[in-house]
Image (tube, helix red, strand yellow):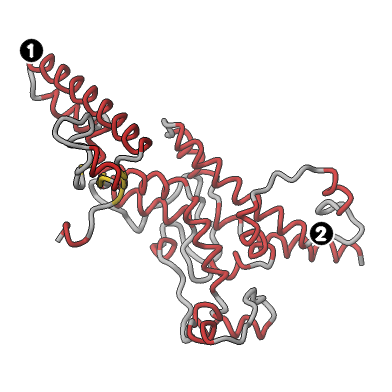
């Protein structure tokens, strides 16, 4: 009947969307109230847009024939295309139900973000008995505070290839790889991996999770360095009297020197100083900030003129060792 068909469609949508794996209302409500930077707001917006794109693709895929459940082709033609073209493959994967499969062996993004944030910022580190705001302990599989909530699921007794092949045989997984007859295709097993698209979905959603982006940005900001090299034009033009002299051979200068001191670190320094020393500290910080701004602008100017190349990167492994 039409009613049973509708129930089947909505059940299929809910299974493919994996709402409980991508969104926790209590936790994200608390996180939103703690955001203080524009970048953090844009991270949340980007994550919500990604989830929305996937959900809309699922609705389109499972829409009722002749019904109004997912909006027909006539309605879609009236709407201007606002979707990102570089998310087309993600939408295809999500519409085929790969979210449901990938979270059988991947930890949900918001839990990964919480673990990463607590590990990097909490003095006591991450606690596996942590509960989330609004949790009521009614999870049918686990009790409230169960450490297993914070560990990626494991598929017992099967290799990834066997697991993927089993899902394809059962009809749950649609292989999105197109076989080709050439040596390069046969030599690269990743191209024929049945779970490749599932991992892509998980990678996209992890890469857009707001906490993960916030913490990785902080790591990059504190650890990244800038290295410059003169171009062939710069080698002939830059001498000891040139305005770019000294800027053309920077080697792994910490990028953090071009940012204000961290508030927590600055507060610790101020706590040990008297009034006169605090004035001297403020003057020194102001001088460093001015000099770093001037140097950065000169770097941009020199790069634009074609005299140097600028590379911002993490320290090379050989330098760390």
Residue 52: image location, x then y, percent: 65, 49
Residue 101: image location, x then y, percent: 58, 70
Q: Is residue 51 left or right of residue 161?
A: right
Report the residue at 50% width, 78% height from top.
190
Single out the mark in the foreground, 1 or 2.
1
Q: Is residue 307 left or right of residue 92?
A: left
Q: Quadrant of the N terminus?
A: bottom right
Residue 200: image location, x then y, percent: 53, 65
Report the residue at 29% width, 46% height from top.
231
136 and 203: which is toward the camera: 203
Q: How many marks?
A: 2
Q: Identify the residue under disc 2.
A: 63
Measure the C-alpha gap from mark 1 to mark 2. 71 Å
Dot 2, crowdedness within 10 Å: few (<14), some or many (≥20)? some
Callout 1 secondary element = helix
Q: Quadrant of the C terminus?
A: bottom left
| Outermost residue to the front | 236
Q: Residue 279, located in which quarter of the rendered image? A: top left
Is any part of residue 15 visible from this angle? no
Q: Identify the residue under disc 1.
A: 276
Is any part of residue 73 visible from this angle? yes
Report the residue at 69% width, 63% height from top.
95
Q: Earlier in the sequence, mark 1 or mark 2?
A: 2
């Amino acid at each position: 009947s039409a009613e049973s068909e509708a129930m089947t469609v909505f059940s299929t949508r809910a299974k493919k969307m994996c709402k409980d794996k991508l969104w926790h209302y209590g936790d994200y409500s608390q996180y939103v109230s703690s955001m203080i930077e524009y970048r953090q707001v844009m991270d949340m917006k980007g994550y919500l847009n990604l989830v929305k794109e996937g959900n809309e693709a699922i609705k389109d895929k499972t829409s009722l024939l002749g019904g109004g459940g997912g909006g027909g082709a006539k309605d879609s033609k009236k709407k201007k295309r606002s979707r990102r073209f570089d998310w087309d493959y993600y939408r295809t994967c999500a519409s085929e139900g790969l979210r449901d499969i990938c979270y059988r062996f991947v930890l949900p993004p918001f839990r990964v973000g919480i673990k990463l944030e607590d590990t990097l910022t909490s003095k006591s580190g991450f606690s596996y008995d942590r509960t989330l705001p609004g949790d009521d302990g009614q999870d049918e599989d686990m009790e409230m505070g169960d450490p297993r909530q914070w560990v990626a699921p494991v598929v017992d007794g099967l290799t990834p290839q066997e697991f993927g092949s089993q899902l394809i045989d059962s009809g749950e997984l649609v292989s999105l790889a197109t076989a080709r007859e050439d040596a390069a295709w046969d030599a690269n097993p990743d191209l024929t991996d049945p779970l490749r698209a599932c991992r892509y979905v998980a990678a996209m959603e992890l890469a857009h999770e707001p906490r993960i982006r916030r913490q990785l940005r902080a790591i990059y900001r504190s650890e990244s360095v800038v290295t410059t090299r003169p171009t062939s034009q710069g080698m002939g033009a830059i001498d000891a009297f040139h305005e770019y002299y000294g800027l053309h051979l920077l080697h792994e200068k910490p990028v953090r020197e071009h940012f204000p001191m961290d508030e927590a670190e600055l507060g610790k320094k101020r706590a040990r100083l008297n009034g006169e020393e605090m004035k001297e500290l403020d003057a020194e910080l102001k001088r460093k900030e001015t000099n770093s701004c001037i140097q950065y602008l000169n770097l941009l100017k020199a790069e634009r003129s074609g005299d140097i190349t600028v590379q911002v990167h993490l320290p090379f492994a050989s330098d760390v060792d």
